[in-house]
Amino acid sequence: MANEPTAQEWTNAQEETTVSLDTHELTVSYYDDGATTATENPIVFLHGIPTWSYLWRDVAPAFEDERRVIAPDFVGYGNSAMHDGFDRSVRAQEEVLDDLLAQLEVDQIDLVAHDIGGGVALRYAAHNPDAVGKLVLSNSIAYDSWPIQFVVDLGLPATINDMTVDDVDEQLTGMFRSTLVDPDDEFVEAMASRFRSDDGRISLSRNAIATNTSHTTEIDYGAITAETYFIWGENDEFQPIEFAERLDDDLENTAGIARLDANHWVPADRPSQYVDQLSNFLE
């Protein structure tokens, strides 16, 4: 898309705060822009593993004329805290989101989420039904649909201890290039670069080992009242569209499934179509 921000421009636009997680005080970087005085709910965009908020580079800015848009980097990802010693699970990221929104004095949101961000969104929507107006899930984890083998392998100490920073970089770059419909050098570089250090290498492993299926199987899906829409890459082998269909059946208030010709990274693969579908649902 035209005029898409570079990773450095996105980073420069981010703000930072400190959130409390268990016994830790952790730095969270987040993108916060757009019409802060708008009467409509802010739109909050959540990424997954192993991405960061830059996943939404072509989507979030499209709404800034009329909405406030907020896109955090989860702890352990992007430009947020990456040092060792804290939980990166879906449960933990929900706590991070809750603290961040409280600091930003945001009470009601529309929530758009991808991959493990979808698990965070489902938990948040179930625990805070009055706070989420509309919910959009894209190639999201749910139930026992995850983790995939690539992530499981990264979480094995024997694997990551034998891998150099270059090895991790090669694995991530290769994975993105093989699963994007039309790999974009800027996007692939931006995704891989955040783990291109010893702290990043260990953080990626900790992120992977924190993938706990219990955190999505324990959700009371019946407690989610937000109107929910699914924008799904229908060729995804990581989170097959059958899980969107199951969620569509199980959730109380759904608006159907948009099936896009994409793999797992649908916001990056089909940004124009994604924006169109999201605009139609949120209007």
Image (cartoon, helix red, strand yellow):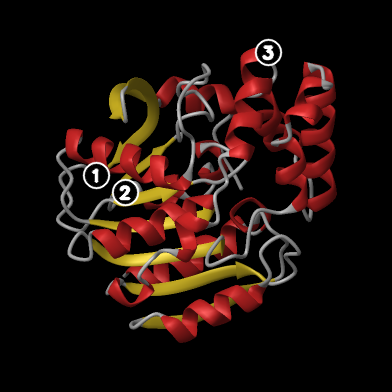
From what the image shows, is residue 156 above or below residue 162?
A: below
Q: Amino acid at mark 1?
A: Ala
Residue at horizontal 51 percent and vertical 16 percent from the top: 83
In the figure, is residue 115 to the left or right of 256? right
Q: Measured from the top left, where is residue 38 in percent x and y?
A: 18, 51
Numbered disc in front, either 3 or 1: 3
For mark 3, give the secondary structure.
Answer: helix
From what the image shows, is residue 251 above or below residue 215?
A: below
Quadrant containing the C terminus in the rendered view? bottom left
Numbered disc in front, either 2 or 3: 3
The circle on residue 65 is: 2
Q: Could you tell me if the residues under marks 2 and 1 are in contact, i.e. CB atoms within 8 Å?
A: yes
Location of mark 3 (residue): 198
Q: Measured from the top left, where is residue 200 in percent x and y?
A: 63, 20
The image quadrant that residue 171 belongs to is top right
In the figure, is residue 258 to the left or right of 23? right
In 3D space, how far apart are the residues under numbered discs 3 and 1 (Cα atoms)? 38 Å
The circle on residue 35 is: 1
Q: Measured from the top left, where is residue 227 in percent x and y?
A: 32, 75
The image quadrant that residue 239 belongs to is bottom right
Which of marks 3 and 2 precedes in the sequence?
Answer: 2
